[in-house]
Image (cartoon, rainbow, N blue to C red):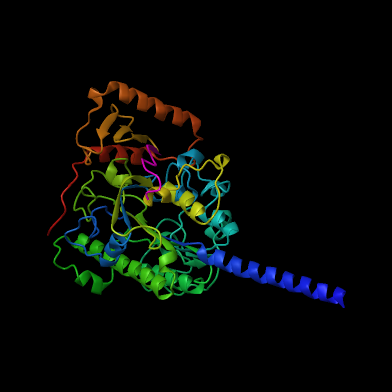
Amino acid sequence: MMFKLNIHKGAMLSLFVLILSIFSGASSAQDKPNFVVIIADDLGYGDLGYTGSLQIKTPHIDQLAHGGVIVEQGYVSAPVCGPSRAGLMTGRNQVNFGFDNNNVKPGPQYNKDYFGLPVTEKTIANWLAPLGYVSGLMGKWHLGDEPHFKAQNRGFDEVWTYPVGGHDYFRSEPDGEGYLSPLESNFKTPQPITYLTDDTGNESVDFIRRHKDKPFFLYASFNAPHAPLQAKKEDIARYKHIKNEKRQIYAAMIHNLDVNVGKIIATLKEQGVYDNTVVIFLSDNGGSVARKNPRLTNAPYRGGKGILLEGGIRVPFIVSWPGKLEAGTRYHYPITALDILPSFVAAAGGRIEKQDNIDGVNVFPYLTMEKSGNPNAKLMWRFTVSASIREGDWKLIRLPDRLPQLYNVKLDVAEQHDVASKHPERVNRLLKVLGQWDVSTPQHLYMEGAKYKKIQLDSYDVEYNLIQPQE
């Protein structure tokens, strides 16, 4: 009888341990934060309410900003979409694996097997999967169209996307190419496009609803306000007071983007996961400023998409985590898109080792004030023939057709006063650091033709409007 009783006690103990482990695991999973990255495409820095727009209203993005942390010096790792997104997705400066330029085809060096994010690189989704996360990409990918580059083969469980770097907002064709390419998904049959920004928002909302009970990573990758300039008539009507017709349409595109950001945030709240969700909003690069009849503004910064002046790489950047980060905070040191991956991995309970060669920094301890100082005291960029380095408040730009330029971006945010001649030792030292980086990096995967090199260099000489448009 005693023997049977001991078996009974042992069984009860085992059952208790099993139940405890189940509940402990459930609690641990629930404690892990969800992650949502909302990325805009070619968004002008000055074209949101919270960044100073006098014309375009963005109440939902503004509310997210004022309810979270406004990163006043938010940067991306490249001034164009492809390499910028490669850096964000890997936490590594994309130059360190040869992704200097957009993977635009065709070119004399085109080889489809190498035309995307190298398969040796791990994505955020790859890092989060073993930590118990389900990951979804809804929207633009732009990191390769061949099967081995597609998001569903790079760690993402659910993908709703389109090939190449942009798309028509109202239609696609079954056999279409470029901006008319058919939508693709690995978990559903894509429905016809209604309006692409709305569709991206709706797919993002559905993903949250399906996965609210498990830690998730949502990459809500909007095409707006990237070309083509297309908006819904009712949204354009809101901005008829703007005299510039192109800006009317552009403003309407941002309005619709804002509405869909609002839908995502509202869904997080409705599903009861908002307080335990990190939401990051940013643009992939600065706005594309046309020389004639500009439709957007990167004010107060000079430059735009495609160049390394602040207007090309400094972007709206919001971090919200209601359960952890104090609302209404402004963070004054630089944070970059490279910091997203290591921050997420750390918050999810993962560990990054030195040999992983991650260039970003876990910035959550800085945003919670557990750590002080500058998490990114040195930043470097290279885009085809141009390069730049920022050390503290000093920023050097190196171009092939002129002497190096040096700016103090704290005192001169618009980079209007080149002080290189006054600081020759600093210039030489920073040039040497850039040169050492050059010789340590692999060859460019994607080259740029002479025509585009000239356009890029000429863009440094444009007189940019640094004042918010009012009419």
Quick one: 102 or 301, which is closer to the camera?
301
Q: Is residue 392 left or right of residue 22?
A: left
Outermost residue, top side: 425
**For residue 283, what is the image quadrant?**
bottom left
Residue 130 visible: yes
Residue drawn 58% across the image and 46% down it? 120
Q: Quadrant of the N terminus?
A: bottom right
Q: Position of residue 17 (x, y in %)?
A: 69, 68
Quarter in which the C terminus is drawn: bottom left
Bounds of the magenta segment:
369-382
Q: Main secondary structure of the magenta part?
A: loop
- Compared to residue 26, the image places residue 330 above or below, namely above
Question: Residue 377, image x and y in percent?
Answer: 37, 37
Q: Is residue 36 above or below residue 191?
A: above
Q: What residue is drawn where x is 74% and y is 74%?
A: 12
Q: How many labels were placed on the picture?
A: 0
- Which residue sits furthest bottom? 1
Residue 98 relative to residue 24: left or right: left
Above or below 125: residue 211: below
In magenta segment, residue 375: yes
Q: Residue furthest left?
A: 471
Q: Can you see residue 171?
A: no
Residue beneath the point at 51% across and 71% down? 211
Q: Position of residue 242 (x, y in %)?
A: 15, 63
Question: Residue 103, percent across and down?
Answer: 45, 48
- 245, 252: nearer the viewer: 252
The answer to whether residue 215 is magenta is: no
